[in-house]
Amino acid sequence: MASKDRIQRLKEETRINILDASLQIAKEEGWPALSMRKIADAIEYTAPIIYEYFSNKDAILMELTRKGFLILARDMKAAKEKHRLPAKQLEAMWLAYWNFAFAEKELYQVMFGVDVNCCELCEIMPEAEVPWTMVTEVIEDLMTPYKPTEDEVSVKYYTFWSVIHGLISINMVRRRTSDEITHEVLKTAISGIIRSIKA
Amino acid sequence: MASKDRIQRLKEETRINILDASLQIAKEEGWPALSMRKIADAIEYTAPIIYEYFSNKDAILMELTRKGFLILARDMKAAKEKHRLPAKQLEAMWLAYWNFAFAEKELYQVMFGVDVNCCELCEIMPEAEVPWTMVTEVIEDLMTPYKPTEDEVSVKYYTFWSVIHGLISINMVRRRTSDEITHEVLKTAISGIIRSIKA
DNA sequence: ATATTTGCCTAACGGTGTTAAATTATTTAA
DNA sequence: TTAAATAATTTAACACCGTTAGGCAAATAT
């Protein structure tokens, strides 16, 4: 019964088609625009068919994040193997992480829950600038002896923001880490950046 | 016509009620569960009434992020004013930022687009652990001379992850910053953490 | 007392994820 | 080869979503 095999192959193919179509739609129109009917359209079926391959929409997203982690792991492994010194390996791995995030932006978004909506409008919200100006002022204060350029101040500001926002996001979407470790990271990061400013 | 005033006051009150109810629902059931009909239920009206106070659902979220930024700014200002040394001010401000994020978790989520869904299930995804183990191994490599505890390694790992993920998120939800600044932050952050590991 | 404005609701439209039933096509059995 | 059984796919529906239009009733103004 070789036809069984053929049918099995076709089934696997449509499964892949569903995943591909979903990612494609996300790339073209963003994750919020992804709908079961739109996926069905893309694979030239009707919506209920999808439920023979995935138990629901979340399962599709889950499978795509799994795929994302596989690609990320592969990239980081390749980056690591290009070097022998651990320090160089670390640098290369995190650069690979960075590159993956932007090369496979949509996968990264679904993997780590980065919203992308709503924020063209945020541009026109003066209140959102207050924390920025406040912190920037103090950084300038601290750096005055070194006569920093505006860009140098920005670098320090974004370093602060990214480490703290990153730590917050990670703690919000995955609870796992212990509070002591998180607090230790926060504390040493802040004092580390401050030290780097003064140096 | 004092009744005009009373009516005006009542109108402002329902406006506030809408905002309060929305935040309340988000706190109890999360942002994805927030719907216009549910808000209407909470304020004991029907859904279309809401559109007399806000042009659409996004406008409600926008107003809440505005509110969030005001609270954040107030907290950071208060933290700053408790100190005179810029370094201490900076530390206090970022700690205030941190505390705000968890004290007003839902506001922070809507302000910075931190998804919270989907990720109880992620726990059962072994692929998600690969990058973690890979990086951790190299960090252990690098720290072997110093005989680090497991927690110390974790601290370094999460420092890396938070600064890089934070920088990525910021670049995905607000484009604004120049690529040079971003790249400078990334580069110096990575080498800085590596240096702190070796020290 | 009549006309007009206001406040609020019901009903509806087009969309979403999802499920059950009906229909069609294919394979198997007689 | 034809009839029965099984599989594949669709249609129809449910309950929800954001949003808009139309209508009814009460308050206000003339």
Image: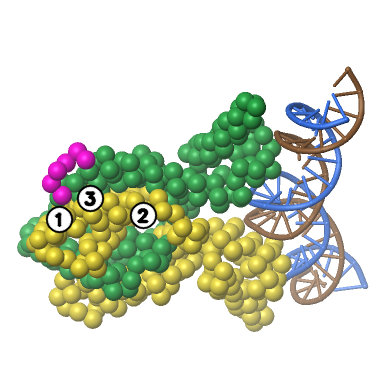
Chain colours: A green, B yellow, C blue, D brown
Q: Do marks 2 and 3 both belong to one polypeptide chain?
A: yes
Residue B176 in magenta stretch: no
Q: Position of residue A70 (x, y in %)?
A: 39, 44
C-alpha distance separating marks 2 and 3 = 23 Å
Magenta-colored span: A81-86
Of the residues tagged 2 and 3, which is closer to the observer? 2
Which residue lies under the disc numbered 3?
A: B186
Label 3 near label 2: C-beta < 8 Å?
Answer: no
Question: Which of the 4 quarters of the picture holds residue B54?
Answer: bottom right
Which residue lies under the disc numbered 1?
A: B142
Q: How many residues crowd around disc 3 within 10 Å: few (fewer than 14), some, or many (20 or more)?
A: many
Look at the numbered disc 1 and give the secondary structure of its residue. Answer: helix
In the picture, measured across the screen, residue B18 lies left or right of residue B71, that is right
Which residue lies under the disc numbered 2?
A: B129
Quarter occupied by the N terminus of chain B? bottom right
Chain ID at mark 2: B
Of the residues tagged 3 and 1, which is closer to the observer? 1
Q: Nearer the viewer, residue D24 or B151?
A: B151
Look at the numbered disc 3 and give the secondary structure of its residue. Answer: helix
Chain ID at mark 3: B
**Residue at 49% of width from left, 66% of height from top?**
B64
